[in-house]
């Protein structure tokens, strides 16, 4: 489970490998690296490099997809609208 979390953090964040190791419960960077390599077959740095190499640049993603990814979920949007209506500040 910790290795899965570390893999996700390596692929999805720019956190340093050391910080990821400690954030996922490892007390030693060496133990983290060895265990990670034994389980995944790659070093943490190699996983990060591979993820960065295969990442899609945001300028190639359609604007509508980027906007949809930034929208709040429906429950949050409804609650925000109700709050604004109750306060009389709804920009309609």
Image (cartoon, rainbow, N blue to C red):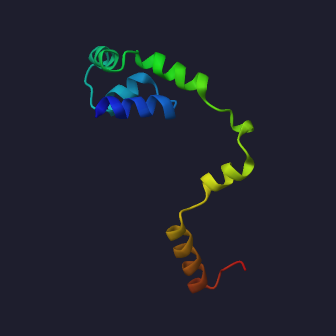
**Where is residue 22, by image quadrant?**
top left
Question: Can you give x and y, in whole percent of width and height, for residue 80 in the image?
Answer: 56, 73
Question: Can you give x and y, in whole percent of width and height, for residue 57 in the image?
Answer: 68, 33
Question: Can you give x and y, in whole percent of width and height, for residue 50 in the image?
Answer: 53, 20
Eyeballing the image, is 33 above or below 75?
above
Left or right of 39, for residue 74: right
Eyeballing the image, is 11 above or below 43?
below
Left or right of 87, for residue 48: left
Left or right of 63, for residue 72: left
Quadrant containing the C terminus is bottom right
Quadrant containing the N terminus is top left
Q: Residue at x 47, y 16 (%)?
A: 46
Q: Residue at x 60, y 84 (%)?
A: 85
Q: Residue at x 32, y 28 (%)?
A: 3
Viewer-side residue, 22 vs 2:
2
Left or right of 8, for residue 77: right
Eyeballing the image, is 9 above or below 36?
below
**Where is residue 41, by image quadrant?**
top left
Q: Residue at x 71, y 77 (%)?
A: 91
Viewer-side residue, 23 vs 2:
2
Eyeballing the image, is 43 above or below 8?
above
Total numbered labels: 0
């Amino acid at each position: 489970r910790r290795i899965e979390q570390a893999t996700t953090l390596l692929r999805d964040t720019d956190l340093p490998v050391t910080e990821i190791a400690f954030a996922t419960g490892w007390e030693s960077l060496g133990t983290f690296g060895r265990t990670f390599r034994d389980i995944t077959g790659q070093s943490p740095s190699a996983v990060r490099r591979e993820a960065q190499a295969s990442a899609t640049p945001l300028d190639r993603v359609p604007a509508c997809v980027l906007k949809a990814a930034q929208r709040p979920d429906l429950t949050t949007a409804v609650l925000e609208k109700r709050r604004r209506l109750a306060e009389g500040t709804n920009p309609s």
